[in-house]
Amino acid sequence: KMCMREGSKFVPLELLATLAVAVGSRIRTIGKVCVHDVRKEQLVIRAVDCKAEFTVDCRLIEPFPKDPHALYQFIGELVRTEEEQGRGRVVLKAVTYRCVNGLNFDLYKRAQSARFPP
């Protein structure tokens, strides 16, 4: 018997940046890479339509072919990191990504809203 987990819901970066989504949630989000720290295996992505930023743990998707002008969709799970002071922070642990250049972002957001009503 196989249990199916819920699908990954699209979450805009402006919501992720406010941590309005629960740790452990499987999500997908879209943004442009603004920082790629190869040693920490982390990306910082910026939202398309605002200045919200969020950290992506990219250990499972390395090597990551960063194109500074490309738009990427990341799918993964929100996890809390273990930092030295024990407080940690929430990051998206990406399991897959894809380049979505040319995506009509407004139409995509409307389609996601229809698929996953609030």
Image (cartoon, grey):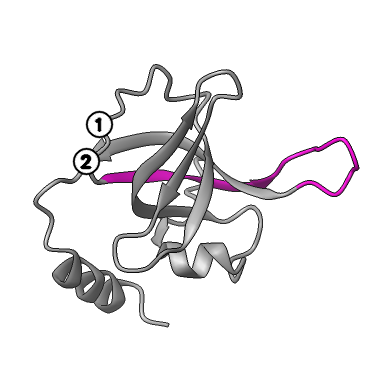
Rendered-image quadrant of the C terminus: bottom left
Q: Determine whether 47 is above or below 98 in the image.
A: below
Picture coordinates of residue 41, whole percent (x, y): 55, 24
Check residue 77 for magenta coloring: yes
Q: Please state if 100 lies on the left or on the right of 92 as rendered.
A: left
Question: Any mark on residue 70, and which?
Answer: 2
Q: Secondary structure at mark 1?
A: loop
Picture coordinates of residue 29, whole percent (x, y): 38, 55
Quarter of the rendering containing residue 110: bottom left
Q: Secondary structure at mark 2?
A: loop
Q: Do tag 2 and tag 1 residues touch (Cβ < 8 Å)?
A: yes
Picture coordinates of residue 81, whole percent (x, y): 73, 40
**Residue located 27% across and 69% down the image:** 112
**Residue located 53% across and 63% down the image:** 16
Q: How far apart in space, not on screen, are marks 2 and 1 (Cα)?
A: 5 Å
Q: Name the amino acid, label 2.
A: Ala
Q: Name the amino acid, label 1.
A: Asp
Quarter of the rendering containing residue 9: bottom left
Q: Determine whether 55 is above or below 48 in the image.
A: above
**Residue located 90% across and 42% down the image:** 85
Numbered disc total:
2
The residues colored magenta run 72-88
Question: Any mark on residue 67, and which?
Answer: 1
Out of 41 and 21, give the one closest to the viewer.
Answer: 41
Out of 107 and 5, give the one closest to the viewer.
Answer: 107
Picture coordinates of residue 25, whole percent (x, y): 57, 56
Label 1: how many Cα within 10 Å (few below 14, some 14–19, many 20+): few
Out of 12 and 68, give the one closest to the viewer.
Answer: 68
**Residue located 44% across and 62% down the image:** 13
Instruction: State the residue lying farthest toward the right.
Output: 85
